Amino acid sequence: ACNPSQPYSVAISAQALAQAILAKGQGIAPVYHNSALHTNMMMSKATVASIACVLLSQSPSALASGVETCGVGGCRSENSQDHVLLQLNSPARTKLVQSHSANPFAWQTSGNTAAAGQWCEGQEPAPEWSLKSSCLGGLDIKVMTYNLFWWNLFGQQFQNGNGGSAGKLIQASGVDAPLDFMVFQECEDGNRVLRDAGLEATHAALGIQHAIALAYRKDVWRLEGSDVLVDVAEDQPGLWGRRSLLLARFKHVASGKTVLLANHHGPLVVGSGGICGGKATAWNILRAIAEHAQADDAIVLMGDFNSEASSETVQTLDRYINRHYTGVSFRGVDHIFSSCETMHIKEVKNLGNGGSDHDALAEVLTI
């Protein structure tokens, strides 16, 4: 019933909980203001009732005697019998309701941090938490990651598109099997790439902020909601700035299977993990995915991570998500990861650079 992706806590009146449990029909139960965190919420009666039932099943005396509450300032004793604090994110120490049974990807943290005090501070995942899972199989998908070297390959004073060389590479890669998903880094116009590849009628492009974009096969997949951009890292001083993760969820029209697609262009200097380091960058990527993943998603994370396989960023990611393929450009900074085990890989291929300074990587996997 709790949404662990929401970074706040709320205080809920015990009376409101009881009313919500007893009430019939539809409606809204009030969720009272938490003065410490300055947060107001409204929550459906059904949701409040679900939370209350879980709470009572784990601690029947909680509503009568008060509970220990944990927030951003640490834990304290809550002596009031009228309020119960439900922590909806993952504090370092908590005795509150955090049900992860419905979603195995729901974010959990050990409480340890890296780069403490910086905006890109990262929280270490809990020891038992992972994005690795067993995909059921039955549906083959083809994915690609490609850093397009935009300023040079498409810049008018440089290669000026090079006769559509990147598009031709993409088009050729889809001859044997159509590309379901593509992610681009250093991309200023995803639609231009699709036009050059002859895919504008069959595919749609999303996102160009921070020069990262993705494209999907729109006759086969339906976008669920909208794409989301999350800042996860920052370059070393004097370089480009913040780096992001672009996420979007898609549902396969015929089978109903879902894919959470994530695209990342990592921080510079190469291999450094940026100002917050490799661990924090990796943990922030993992948390952003966890906070948007649903239980049945096949997760595919791709991009130019600006980190080699031996880097702290990639080594940290390897502990929590399966790495399927690594390229060779710049000593191997382009990667494809997935929640699906490596046994689900049907094919991986280095497609060449098509005029870029990075090779495009493609994979066929079964989800």
Image (spheres, helix red, strand yellow):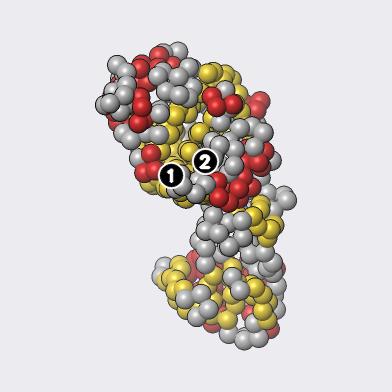
What residue appears at the point 64 percent right and 32 percent down from the top-left corner? 309
Q: Residue furthest right?
A: 127
Q: In this rendering, does residue 222 appear at all?
A: no
Give whichever of 242, 59 is nearer the camera: 242
Give whichever of 166, 14 is nearer the camera: 166
Q: Quadrant of the N terminus?
A: bottom right
Q: Quadrant of the C terminus?
A: top right
Q: Residues within 10 Å of mark 2 (few under 14, many from 20)?
A: many
Give whichever of 259, 233 is nearer the camera: 233
The reply, left or right, for residue 48 in relation to residue 341 is left
Task: Provide residue 328's location: percent of width, then percent of height.
Answer: 57, 23
From the image, tell me which residue sits under label 2.
Answer: 268
What residue appears at the point 67 percent right and 64 percent down from the top-left corner? 92
The reply, left or right, for residue 294 in relation to residue 248 is right
SS class of the residue under badge 2?
loop
From the image, tell me which residue sits under label 1.
Answer: 240
Task: Provide residue 335's location: percent of width, then percent of height.
Answer: 56, 31
Amino acid carrying label 1: it is: Trp
The reply, left or right, for residue 233 in relation to residue 356 is right
Q: CA distance from mark 2 to mark 1?
A: 8 Å
Amino acid carrying label 2: it is: Leu
SS class of the residue under badge 1?
loop
What residue appears at the point 42 percent right and 32 percent down from the top-left corner? 184
Residue 289 sits above or below residue 11 on the image? above
Task: Look at the numbered discs 2 and 1 and tell me whether their residues touch, using CB distance below 8 Å.
Answer: yes
Residue 6 sits above or below residue 312 on the image? below
Task: Provide residue 208's location: percent of width, then percent of height.
Answer: 35, 40
Q: Residues within 10 Å of mark 1 (few under 14, many from 20)?
A: few
Task: Provide residue 283's location: percent of width, then percent of height.
Answer: 61, 49
Q: In this rendering, does residue 348 appear at all?
A: yes
Identify the mark nearer the N-term, 2 or 1. Answer: 1
For residue 98, what is the image quadrant?
bottom right
